[in-house]
Amino acid sequence: MNKLRFKTIGLNGFWDKEEEIDFEIKSIIPRNALEKIYNRIDEKYIEVIIGPRQVGKTTLLNLLLYKLQHHNKRHDNLYYINLDTIVDYKMFENPSMFYELISKSFGQDKVVNYVFIDEAQRLKNPGQFLKGLFDLKKNIKIFVSGSSSLELKSKTKEFLTGRKREVILLPVSFFELVNYEGKIKDDLRHIKLADKTISVWQKNELFYGKYLSERTRDFELYGSYPGVLTKKNAEDKLEELNELFNSYIKKDVVDFLKVERVEVFNKLVKILSAQIGNLLNNSEL
C-alpha cells in the first residue's frame, strides 16, 4: 500500500495539518491526462480539470500529488483540500487572505508550492477567486477540479481566460483500459488499426481476438466509467450505472440547470438515446 502525504486545513483554520492516506496506485487505471498535465508542471497556468461526474477527477488529483511527492522526494510543499469537507469558505473569498494563511506553512526554501482544490464549484465565485490568486504572482501552482463540470465551467470561464489550461476528463478510453490490464504485448498495443497495419492484427487475432471482443462488448453494454469497469458482475455494474444516472439528474439537471419536470426530461433522454446516429427533427420532439 502506498502513502499519500500532504498538508490541509486544520480545525484552527490554518494549513498546518499533516495528512497521510493509503493510496493503492496499482488498482487505479492510468489516465492519459496525467502526463499531459504533469508535462506542464513548471508552467504557472492554473490547471482546471472538468468532466462528467465519477470519471476520476479526484483520483487524477491524487495521482498528481503522488507523482510530485515521489519525483521531488518531499511532500511539505503539497497542499490539498476537498471543499466538501469544510463549512466555512471565508478564506476563499479573498485571494490575498488565502495566500497569507497558506504561506504561513511554507518552508524557508524558495520552492514552488502546489495547491489542489477539489470540488471548487462549491465556492460562490471560484473564477474570481482563482484569478485574484493567480494575479498575485506568488510561488504557487494551482490545480482545481469539481464534480459538477457544468457549474465549474460556467463559474470560471469569464475570469480565467489566458490564465488556465483546461483538461476535459472523460470516462476511461478503450486504450487506457487495455493498457492497464496489460494482456496485450507492449509493441502491439501502440499499433493503431489501419489499412497498413491490419495484417499485423490479423496475425495476432488467435491470441487476442477473444479478449478484445469481450472488452468491446462490455464497453458497448455498460460504458466505461471507472466505477462500473471495476465491478465484477452485471448486477453490480447496473447498480453503479443507476447511481450515476440519479446523481446526474439530481445534482446537475435539477440543481444546476433548474429543470423542474424531471420525468419529462427523462423521457426526452430516452427518445434522444434511441436516435443516436440518425437525423433529429426538433418539431417531432
Image: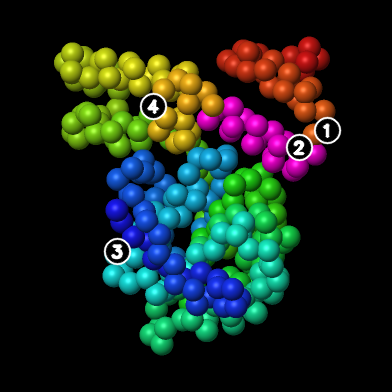
Separation (CA) of disc 4 from disc 1 = 36 Å
- Residue 260 image label: 1
The amino acid type, in three-letter code, at marker 3 is His
Counting from the top left corner in percent of width and height, residue 63 is at 39, 54
Counting from the top left corner in percent of width and height, residue 154 is at 70, 50
| Residue at x 33% of width, y 49% of height | 25
User: In the image, which residues are magenta?
Assistant: 240-258
Badges 2 and 1: C-beta atoms under 8 Å apart?
yes
- Residue 232 image label: 4
- Residue 88 image label: none
Residue, disc 3: 70
| Residue at x 69% of width, y 39% of height | 252
Magenta-span inclusion, residue 241: yes
Q: Quadrant of the C terminus?
A: top right
Question: Does 166 sit above or below residue 92?
Answer: above
Which of labels 2 and 4 is toward the front?
4
Q: Does dot 1 land on a helix, a strand or a loop?
A: loop
- Residue 254 image label: 2
**Few, some or many residues within 10 Å of mark 2 (<14, 14–19, 20+):** some
Badges 3 and 4: C-beta atoms under 8 Å apart?
no
**Few, some or many residues within 10 Å of mark 1 (<14, 14–19, 20+):** few
